[in-house]
Amino acid sequence: MMMNLFSIFDPMCMTLNLSMNWISSLLSILFIPSTFWLISSRMNMMWTKILLNVHNELMPLLKINLNKGSTLIFSSLFIYIIFNNFLGLFPYIFTSSSHLSFTLTLALPLWMSYMMYGWINQTNHMFTHLVPQNTPSILMPFMVLIESVSNLIRSVTLSVRLTANMIAGHLLMVLLSNMSMYLEMHMISILILIQLLLLTLESAVSIIQAYVFMILSTLYSSEVNYVKT
């Protein structure tokens, strides 16, 4: 039995005198399909379809005629996160997306680039965005304060949302696994069925959280990239 439930999220587990856990973040390179084959493989066709669907989802949000190629940034982010989420579902593979050091590394540079670009190039629009339309005059100071705090914590909320959802499911599976040594044989079969259902749910959560991270990042970008018509 584990001494600490959170030990499965400890990146300092040493193997062969090397910290091997973070290597799982680089395993996605092995799954990238080859684009130089004469006939496309099924994996290549699958990823092409996924990228096209993601591209079509992001087109209405990014003003694609003005910022061509912008969807590649967010689709790459989506694929990278979903790979790390799925790899964490396999036994004995470190879940890097369950650490703030991983999620903040993705969210903080994006948020900083949005803020710097917006306040330098779209200063008036950024000030206007702090006060929603039709706000009563008496509430304007409070709305400015609320919107400012909301902008400041966006990187934290993006990273904490992904981390918390990854930790919650894994902790629940660990708790159920630790219960197996105290159960009768007929109850263990029921426990295995519950864990399979929970694993299916975690697979869906891995996809949803990667999608939410990508969509929110895109929405934050579209708020800054304001162009007068």
Image: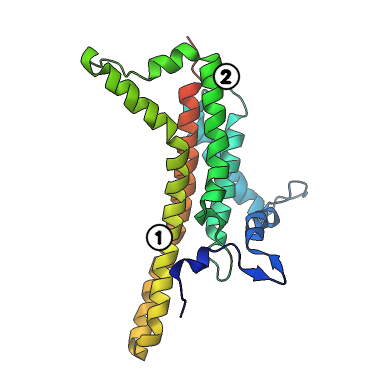
Nearer the observer, 136 or 145: 145
Which secondary structure, mark 1? helix
Q: CA distance from mark 1 to mark 2?
A: 40 Å
How many C-alpha atoms fall within 10 Å of the one at disc 1: few (<14), some, or many (≥20)? Answer: few
Q: Is residue 54 above or below residue 137?
A: below
Other-residue count near label 2 (Cα within 10 Å), few / some / many at <14 / 14–19 / ≥20: few
- In the picture of the structure, the residue carrying the numbered disc 2 is 66
- Measured as percent of width and height from the top left, residue 193 is found at 38, 76
Residue 183 makes an appearance in the image: yes
Front label number (1 vs 2) = 1
Q: Residue at x 40, y 86 (%)?
A: 181
Residue of label 1: 168
Q: Earlier in the sequence, mark 1 or mark 2?
A: 2
Q: Amino acid at mark 2?
A: Leu
Question: In terms of secondary structure, where does tag 2 sit?
Answer: loop
Q: Which mark is residue 26?
A: none
Q: Is residue 32 above or below residue 57?
A: below
> What's the residue type where badge 1 is placed?
Ala
Query: Is residue 136 found left or right of 7 in the rendered image?
Result: left
Do the CB atoms of the residues marked 1 and 2 lie less than 8 Å apart? no
Q: Residue at x 54, y 60 (%)?
A: 95
- From the viewer's perspective, tell me whether residue 85 is left or right of residue 138: right
State the image coordinates of residue 93 (x, y, percent, origin top left).
59, 66
